[in-house]
Image (spheres, grey):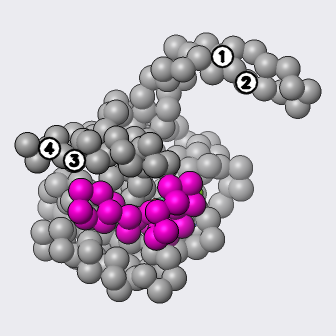
């Protein structure tokens, strides 16, 4: 079977409230360089020419307005919006339910990682099309990390063996459906769910610009980067 020209569906979990950012609106609708965070995230995804569908998971009631924001920057790539769930995993699952079977590859990309460079998206898609069961961008950890046990005792981990995981994460659609069907409660991301099935997770190089906007400090950094781009 030949691969269709746009075999990738991109799921964008955007249903969080953005409590830590405290912008007074859901984080995906917070303004960054005069545009919603969501617009930046969708633009980054559709810059990858193999993306043929964007599925947004939205806060209840914001489906239509978020779909409009995304459609404006999607360059003709179709946009679908669903109501998200109470957790990020629930939001991904609801979005996955509306991805047609014709898409062989699914990306899951946090709206909050709104400045991810195109080369990271491309590397994730390439690795899935090369046969990986799960692909995550990862960056070396810069802080020294200590693991703390139940008694409060702590020990330093070997930083050289650690990677901080970003999105987009990429999967063959069938693998992601199976992982969400099994629904490992201990998994903190989609790759973790695939790992719980006993399948390997492939790392590709992440990028500092794929950082997650979580706090006001992160938004300041994002504002500076966006302002720099416009010069
Ligand atoms: N997300 C989601 N559905 C949820 C919770 C989170 O789609 N029920 C999305 C967020 O919109 C975000 C991504 O998952 O794009 C990563 O979550 P996080 O950075 O924690 O965002 P929020 O949950 O919105 O922020 P906070 O935890 O500070 O409230
Ligand atoms: Mg959250």
Q: Is residue 31 magenta?
A: yes
- CB contact under 8 Å: marks 4 and 1: no
Q: Earlier in the sequence, mark 2 or mark 1?
A: 2
Residue on which disc 2 sits: 147
Tag 2, which secondary structure?
strand
Residue on which disc 3 sits: 226
User: Which dot, 2 or 4, sits closer to the camera?
Assistant: 4
| Residue 125 seen by the camera | no
Q: Ligand 1 within 8 A of label 4's CB?
A: no
Q: Position of residue 84 (x, y in %)?
A: 52, 74
Residue in the image at 65% along x and 60% along y: 183
Range of magenta residues: 14-37
The front one of 73 and 225 is: 225
Q: Position of residue 159 (x, y in %)?
A: 56, 16
The front one of 18 and 85 is: 18
Residue on which disc 1 sits: 157
Picture quadrant of residue 41: bottom left
Q: CA distance from mark 2 to mark 1?
A: 7 Å
Residue on which disc 4 sits: 229
Residue in the image at 33% along x and 53% along y: 114
The quarter of the picture showing ligand 2: bottom right
- CB contact under 8 Å: marks 2 and 1: yes
| Residue 154 seen by the camera | yes
Q: Position of residue 152 (x, y in %)?
A: 86, 26
């Amino acid at each position: 079977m030949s691969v269709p020209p746009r075999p990738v569906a991109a799921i964008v979990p955007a249903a969080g409230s953005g409590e830590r950012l405290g912008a007074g609106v859901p984080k995906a609708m917070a303004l960054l360089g005069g545009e919603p965070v969501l617009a930046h995230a969708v633009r980054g995804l559709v810059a990858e020419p193999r993306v043929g569908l964007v599925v947004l998971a939205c806060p209840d009631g914001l489906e239509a307005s978020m779909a409009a924001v995304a459609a404006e920057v999607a360059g003709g790539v179709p946009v679908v919006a669903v109501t998200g769930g109470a957790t990020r995993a629930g939001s991904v699952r609801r979005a996955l339910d509306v991805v047609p079977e014709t898409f062989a590859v699914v990306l899951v990309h946090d709206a909050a990682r709104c400045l991810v460079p195109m080369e990271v998206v491309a590397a994730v898609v390439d690795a899935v099309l090369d046969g990986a069961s799960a692909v995550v961008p990862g960056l070396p950890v810069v802080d020294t990390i200590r693991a703390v046990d139940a008694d409060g005792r702590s020990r330093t981990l070997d930083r050289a063996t650690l990677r901080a995981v970003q999105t987009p994460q990429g999967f063959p659609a069938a693998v992601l459906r199976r992982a969400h069907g099994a629904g490992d409660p201990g998994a903190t991301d989609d790759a973790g769910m695939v790992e719980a099935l006993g399948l390997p997770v492939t790392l590709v190089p992440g990028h500092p610009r794929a950082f997650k906007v979580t706090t006001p400090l992160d938004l300041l950094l994002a504002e500076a980067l966006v302002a720099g781009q416009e010069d």
